[in-house]
Each structure stands twice: as C-alpha cells, then as structure tokens.
Image (cartoon, rainbow, N blue to C red):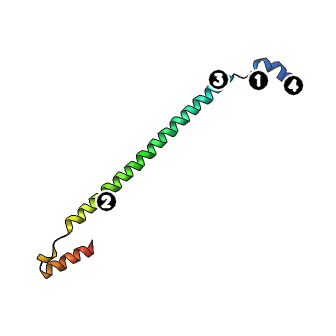
Amino acid sequence: MKFEEYVQNICPMLDIDQPDEERIWNGISASLNVQAKQRRIQYWKFALLVASMMFIAFSGGYSIKKMNKNHHVAVSNMTCIERKMCYDIDCFI
C-alpha cells in the first residue's frame, strides 16, 4: 500500500479539511486570560515588595536617628574624664 492510498483511506477519519475554529479560538482566548492574570499578580507582588522595602528602610532610618538623638549629652556639665569617655564612645560608634 502506498502512502497516498493510505492517506485517502484514512482522510475521512482525520479532521484536516476544516479545523474546529471555535475550539481553537476558545483555547487561545483562555490562555491569554491566564497570562493576563499571571501578569497582574506579578505586578502586585512587585509593588508589595517595593512597599515592604521602603517601609523597612524608613523604619530602620527612624530607629537609627532616634538612637543617635538620645546619645548626645551636654558637655558643659562634665568633668574632663567624663568628656574623654564620651569622646571615646563616639569614636567607637
């Protein structure tokens, strides 16, 4: 049996003359909707990540600023030894 004869015999069983266009387009539109949803989720994840990083940076900066603010002491009321001790602490930090 030649290939051409085989194709002619099996051709009615194959759906090659007219594809099911509605099914094809439904599949394409469904895949596009899934991709759009995945893109939206990725954008929200990125926005949440950026907001979290900004919150951590600002809260860390605020904490460091508050820590440094409480560290300063009026130097005029100290003795020489206390001044040296404060200077050493400031140089250490």
Tell me the distance, in whole angstroms, between the alpha carbons under discs 3 and 4: 29 Å
From this view, report whether residue 32 is shown above or below residue 79. above
In the rendering, at what x and y percent does residue 63 appear? 27, 58
Question: Which residue is pictured at 61% across the width and 25% down the height?
Answer: 26
**Residue situated furthest bottom in the rendering:** 80
Name the amino acid, label 1: Ile
Return the residue at label 1. 16
Tell me the distance, in whole angstroms, between the alpha carbons under discs 1 and 2: 68 Å
Tell me the distance, in whole angstroms, between the alpha carbons under discs 2 and 4: 78 Å
Precedes in sequence: disc 1 or disc 4 = 4
Q: Nearer the viewer, residue 16 or 89?
A: 89
Return the residue at label 2. 61
Tell me the quarter of the picture where residue 78 sits.
bottom left
Tell me the quarter of the picture where residue 72 sits.
bottom left
Mark 1 lies on a secondary structure that is loop
From this view, report whether residue 90 is shown above or below residue 60. below
Disc 1: CA contacts within 10 A as few (<14), some (14-19) or many (>=20):
few
Name the amino acid, label 4: Glu
Label 1 close to label 2 by CB (< 8 Å): no
Question: Which residue is pictured at 12% across the width and 80% down the height?
Answer: 79
Precedes in sequence: disc 2 or disc 4 = 4
Return the residue at label 3. 23
In the rendering, at what x and y percent does residue 70 appear? 20, 64
Question: Which residue is pictured at 45% across the width and 42% down the height?
Answer: 44
Return the residue at label 4. 4
